[in-house]
Amino acid sequence: MKWQTCYTLDSFLKKGEQLAKQCEVITFDLFDTLLVRRIHDPDLVKPSVARFVANKAQRNGLDWTWPRVQTLRDEIEAGQRQETGKRFEDHEACYPQFMGELLKQIFQKKADADLLSEVTDYELMMENSMLVPRAEVVEWLSALHAQGKKIYVLSDVYLPASHLKRLIKHAGFLDSVDEVVSSADSFLAKASGLAFPLLKDRYHLRYESWLHVGDNPFSDGLRPSEKGIKALVLRDSSEKFRKAVVKRYYNYSQGQPFWKGRTVQQLMLPMEKESNAFSPMRVYGYNVLAPLLAGFLQGVAEDCLRQGIKRLYFFSREGWMLKKVWDEIVPFLFPELPIPETSYLYVSRMALAGASCAHQGLIRQNADIVFLPTGNRDFRDVCRVFSLKPEGFAEILNRFDLQVDTVLSGHHEGYLPENIQQFHRLLEDDEFQVEVKRQTIDANKALQLYLQEQRFFEHEHVALVDIGWLGTIQRFFFEAVSHRKETPRCQGYLLGATRGIEYPTAYNNCIHGMLYDRDRFNLAGSTILYAQDLFEEACRAPHPTLNGYQLTPDGFTLEFRDQHDATGQAEKEQDEFYKELQEGIKEGSRQYGIAASILGFKFKDIQPWLHYLLVSRLAFPKADEVATIRHKHHLDDFHGHHSPSNKKIKGRKALWDNSRNTLRWNPLLRLKFFLRLIRDRLRE
């Protein structure tokens, strides 16, 4: 009997329907028929397991590297196949046997059933992460089962049937399968044709009413047809092309670092029906922001491991999403490694600014930060930012010929240089500083209580993670706690460090920009400056902004912004606007973690591709993309409500501020802004 071959999925399903009508039993090959792999080579899963085992061994004081573990696994598996070949026609292996032997040689007496189960669970998790149900074939299988057909899954693989059932259950169609049969259990495989008589005798089947479907012309075509079984083979040209693309990118990545990140993103792509519900907003979160944020946090985790940091705190509202990205990638990228414990801290510039003055007063450098935003104008803005009451300074201001509305910012009409000089003298006045400390001490005490609750002072070295950009939050945070002897060393990690104002770097307090840091020239990375607001809004938490810390009779309380005013309503609207974007970020981050783990790539390996993403999607975006993704509202409590003179802010319009039509019909606009970026970076 000659088997039949189809080269498209449609023709395969159509022919399968015809043949199935004549049959009572249908057996399905599993891999590349019911389940397709994201990777071109199934053996690429093995190194990730070797890294898991090596990490576990090192934590037990054993000197094992993952290449050494992988080599030993290959040797044990090959030896088992040779032994099997002496007794059976098929040179098959059985995972529990060779993995048990591997663990015994590495862990000696510590190798028990629990350890084997733990390693098996991890390997099956990684297998599942690379497997996608071929939706239409699975739907056909379920329909056949509903018609009363006997459905069996038959596979030549080293995983026993019990393991395959776990893969099928994860794929969601185990209820439509009567039984699963693996060559690892009997050492009788489809390749020799001996699996078919085994199945026939075990389940009392008849060859003449049997249809077998698979993807291998030899094992799934020739061998069953020799027994008189109807056979249908799928040679899917589109699937072969997809795997060829993955293989090419992977091969390129072995010699050219740029392609490492491209390979990761190729493995991240949704397959089959995974992308059906993706809106443009979700796609952008998945394809653009997810790899950027996940790569950033992979770099943070790697540096924490290098420095031995045991505790990490996510800062500000953006830290809420960053923590979710962290939780998605860490289980895959760093199994069995001493990754820091994490917490999300409720902090903000506004909440910390006042608390930072309680012991050091209002220093000049911090006061100057107030006038970086063009909306801030006078002493009332200083008081708003640092949670001060202007009336408490009336007499002191008069001594320096200042009023609460004296213009102190060069962005506004009425500014006089002598006024800012008088303001700087005011900052040196002891009476002024005493009043500043008096007004801010309670907020500082409340902050200390909050940090004690978060066990902040129990550590010698902590990591602080934030989006960026000036490091203002960490600056105020450290100044608020630095008076305590038990304050830990604070290592700050920012997505981008613009350093528009000098950061007071010290051994026990420093920041480091991961994708961009102005202290390290990086033209591609600097394109993150095109859309800083985008990252802030896309990552912010769905809760109100923290306004401050307040002492209460029994401790402290966190004071949040009232969401019933116009600004609060705008925040809610913005949260809803970016909801799908954030879903895409979380889903994409998980796939990033899986892909980078499978490939064994580090942050530095993927960095060139992340820089390409920044340039292509921020400096040279599509007009429709900007119009769709650009935020509707951007809340910045630091920014006041004064309107600067147009003359002062002329020429500050950014690329992403332009309309859809301007972006669409001015082809040189993007190049103009990019040349301006190059000029600005060279002048720094």
Image: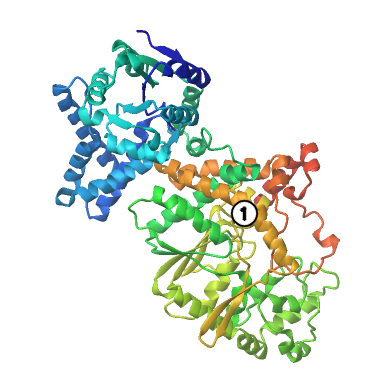
Can residue 319 be spotted in the picture? yes
* Residue sitting at x 78%, y 89%: 398
Question: Residue, x 61% and y 45% (percent of image)?
Answer: 282
Q: Nearer the viewer, residue 661 or 208?
A: 208
Is residue 63 something one can see in this rendering? no
Residue 50, horizontal then vertical, whole percent: 30, 42
Q: Residues within 10 Å of mark 1 (few under 14, many from 20)?
A: many
Q: Quadrant of residue 193?
A: top left
In which quadrant is the C terminus drawn?
A: bottom right
Residue at 67%, 53% (x, y): give it.
577
Q: Amino acid at mark 1?
A: Ala
Task: Provide the secondary structure element on which disc 1 rests.
Answer: helix
With respect to residue 312, does 576 lie above or below? Answer: above
Q: Looking at the figure, which quarter contains the N terminus?
A: top left
Image coords of residue 384 (percent x, y): 70, 77
Give the total number of marks visible in the rendering.
1
What residue does disc 1 label? Answer: 538
Position of residue 399 measured from the top left corner of the image (x, y, whole percent): 76, 90
Position in image of residue 172 (x %, y %) = 43, 39
Left or right for 619, reference 90: right
Q: Residue furthest front?
A: 148
Looking at the image, which is closer to me, 582 or 145?
Answer: 145
Figure check: 138 above or below 209: below
Quick check: 195 left or right of 348?
A: left
Q: Is residue 410 above or below residue 34?
A: below
